[in-house]
Amino acid sequence: MTAYGCTVGIGEVYAEGRERISALVVGLGQQDGDRPVPTCPGWSVRDVVAHLAGVCTDVLAGNVAGVATDPWTDAQVRARRGRPIAQVVEEWSEAAPQVEALAHAFPARMGDQWVADLTTHEHDIRTALGRPGARDSQGLAVGLSFVVELGLHPGVSERGLPPLEVRAGERVWSVGPGQAAGTLDAPAFALFRALTGRRSPAQIRGFSWTVAPDPYIPAFQFGPFTTTAADIEE
């Protein structure tokens, strides 16, 4: 199985993102490791890395009851509180390659979801540290496809909204059943962040729409994701 728009498998896409994050955080001092992450309220940079490491460790251990729920992720963070960030990265570096090697066999689109989670948190960490980058990564391409197709599309359909043509650069999706009644055009990075709860309604309205955006804003809220009250600048 290859990732969307890529000639490599989903495990390799995940590994690329993991290596970028590890390089960002492994040398951080305590102050930066404890830096709050504005897009993950209540979590520090260290906590986000703890969650990422915990996902891989839990998958290997078969601890997937409640996967992606708040109790599941909170347990990952609590279990690693107080550990040096380099130690958490070391745990992740040992567990993740084993999961990456199995990722081709994940059912349905769980591999895409796994990469979308990683990519979301990569940019959460970058925002907290003031270190933007990797906005055209393979992980972002995979993650954006996942949240448009499994988040925005059913959100539009279930609300009975007129279908949209969604454009992000050269990529185009039909969202909702039937012929598109209008278009939404946004940069890929901004659209991905909006669909993972990292943009406000005002920012979503600021995308290029040929229809009134307000009826569609609730469709940007699905699963664990809700729009933010305040604008997020990255």
Image (spheres, helix red, strand yellow):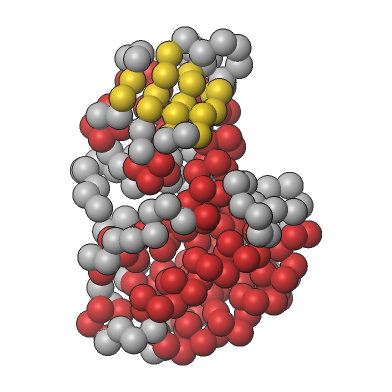
Q: Where in the figure is residue 204, as x and y percent of width and height?
A: 31, 32
Q: Quadrant of residue 11?
A: bottom right
Q: Nearer the viewer, residue 225 or 165?
A: 165
Above-or-below relation of 28 to 146: below
Q: Is residue 82 visible?
A: no
Looking at the image, is 174 positioned above or below residue 194? above
- Drawn side of residue 114 relative to residue 131, left or right: right
Which picture quadrant has residue 97?
Answer: bottom right
- How many callouts does the rendering have? 0
Residue 196 rendering spot, x and y as whole percentages: 43, 46
What residue is drawn where x is 71% and y is 63%?
Answer: 103
Say which of 196 and 182 sits in front.
182
The N terminus, quarter of image? bottom right
Query: Is residue 93 placed above or below 62 in the rendered structure?
Result: below
Residue at 25% from the left image edge and 29% from the top image edge: 206
Query: Residue 40 location, x and y as percent?
Result: 35, 59
39 sits left or right of 219 in the view: left
Q: Residue at x 34, y 72 (%)?
A: 45
Based on the displayed image, in which of its 4 quarters is residue 211 positioned? top left
